[in-house]
Image: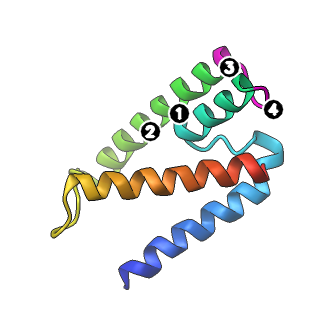
Amino acid sequence: ANAVWGGVSIACVLMVSIYALGGISGANFNPAVTLSIALSQASGGAGMDWKTAGMYMGVQFLAGLCASISYSVLFWNTFNLAPAPGFGFVSTGLCELLYTFMLCFVVLNVA
């Protein structure tokens, strides 16, 4: 399996999910998207109020925690997330920031 195609497949599934579910749920798939939607309303655009955004983000964090516990119980295995060999935390963080910005940009303009 090629690592590049793994990333591309995740991006394609996310894009289809945004188009398919954006009109229903607003594409609130993670806390960064929810925060950007709340910031959009705070700056005069369409979005959601801070109370609703806070509840969404709380549930999203709780769902991530439940998913990680479920994985550990199902497979009796855990792993630490860390940058791949040859990459540092700064370059990995900048990459994550860029891709998160692009995700929020797409959701705000499509959903």
Element type at marker 2?
Answer: helix
Q: CA distance from mark 1 to mark 3?
A: 12 Å
Say which amino acid is labelled 4. Ala
Marks 1 and 4, the one that precedes in the sequence: 4
Q: Position of residue 5 (x, y in %)?
A: 46, 81
Q: CA distance from mark 4 to mark 2?
A: 27 Å
- Is 8 displayed left or right of 52 in the figure? left
- Is 104 displayed left or right of 3 in the figure? right
Please tell me which residue lies in front, 20 or 83. 83
Q: Pointer 4: residues within 10 angstroms few (<14), some, or many (20+)?
A: few
Q: Looking at the magenta stretch, what is its main secondary structure? A: loop
Residue 101 appears in the rendering: yes
Q: Nearer the viewer, mark 1 or mark 3?
A: 3
Reading the image, the residue beneath label 2 is 64
Q: Are marks 1 and 2 in contact (CB under 8 Å)?
A: yes
Reading the image, the residue beneath label 4 is 46
Q: Say the numbered circle drawn on residue 60.
A: 1
Determine whether 81 is above or below 30 in the image: below
Marks 4 and 2, the one that precedes in the sequence: 4
Say which amino acid is labelled 3. Thr
